Amino acid sequence: MPRYLDPKSDLVFKKIFGQHPDLLKSFLNAVLPLPLDGLIDTLEYLPAEQIPHIPVLKRTVVDVKCKDQQGRIFIVEMQIEWTDAFMQRLLFGTATAYVKQLERGETYELLHPVYGLGLINSLFDHESPEWYHHYSMVKVNAPHQCLVNGLSLIFLELPKFAPQNKNDKTLRVLWLRFMRELGQHLYEMPPELLAVPEIKQAATLAEEAAYTNAELSWYDSYWDAISTEKTLLSGKYKEGLAEGLEAGRTATQQHIARTMKARGLLIADIMACTGLSKADIEKL
């Protein structure tokens, strides 16, 4: 049985969607919030010189210029990340792609809308069970009024995604199942995924046999790097949490000591109640 590599890695994602525009078009039409009369008709990959170089965005997956069925043009920048700063990073990259469209002296009417699409392999919104998040610039007291159609951010939290109905055969659900389920020790493709020609082709491109030994080594290194970075981030979080708790405990002790001192209680009694030293209490 073939082993399928995880399409969320740079190597596999680019082999599938960075070299086959028909597959990318099918995927984007399925996951982007596009109207039925505004689906992507054609797309072209942006040349390297037109993609803004942003050092902090190490994992820009692919950038494309799309033309919809009405002839409108928009740009899609895709990222796969996992840090808490991802929203700001994608917003920065999307805004930069928006600004970089114009040469000096060109008019603003030439600007095309830009969609920032984030396929997130971790949780970023811990308060909501929703996995699909669409952000745009709207009027605060009238959210239905969109002020600027030029910038949109779409985040898909893949770990939260689960079809409500196992018989759901919509293209969005099938593509997202492909993105989530491949790489999880999957050796046999579900028949409902293979029934979609584009997904079947994508699955073939994700088979381990399609990669050289050097590419497979790079693939393993990619996930090792992600695992290491997650470990470091987790350590920093725990360290910061401990520091925050200690700071909070000290502030509480000082507040209690100030109150007791203002009421004229003895230093020895304040020390016994708060655990602060005599010198610390005298400074308050």
Image (cartoon, grey):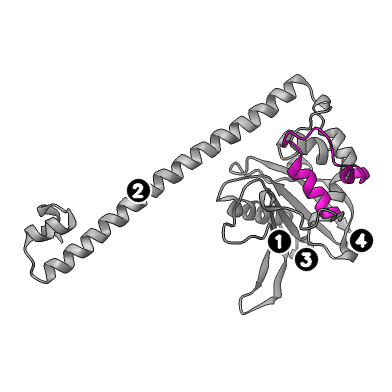
List the residue tagged with mark 1. 152
List the residue tagged with mark 4. 69
Tell me the number on the disc at residue 109: 3
At label 2, which amino acid type do we have?
Glu
Q: Position of residue 62 (x, y in %)?
A: 75, 44
Q: Is residue 196 left or right of residue 111?
A: right
Question: Is label 2 or label 3 in front?
Answer: 2
Instruction: Report the Cα–Cα distance between label 2 and label 1.
Output: 37 Å
Q: Secondary structure at mark 2?
A: helix
At label 3, which amino acid type do we have?
Glu
Above/below status of 173 relative to 220: below
For marks 3 and 4 on the same chain, the one whose residue lies earlier in the sequence: 4
Q: Secondary structure at mark 4?
A: loop
Residue at 69%, 23% in the rendered image: 217
Q: Is residue 222 left or right of residue 71?
A: left
Q: Residue furthest top?
A: 213
At label 4, which amino acid type do we have?
Gln
Q: Position of residue 132 (x, y in %)?
A: 70, 59
Question: Is label 2 or label 4 in front?
Answer: 2
Q: Secondary structure at mark 1?
A: strand
Question: How many numbered tags mark residues here?
Answer: 4
Instruction: Report the Cα–Cα distance between label 3 and label 4.
Output: 20 Å
Q: Which residues are magenta?
A: 171-198
Report crowding for label 3: few under 14, some 14 to 19, many 20 or more residues within 10 A (C-alpha): few
For marks 1 and 4 on the same chain, the one whose residue lies earlier in the sequence: 4
Instruction: Report the Cα–Cα distance between label 2 and label 4.
Output: 55 Å
Is residue 195 in the magenta section? yes
At label 1, which amino acid type do we have?
Ser
List the residue tagged with mark 2. 243
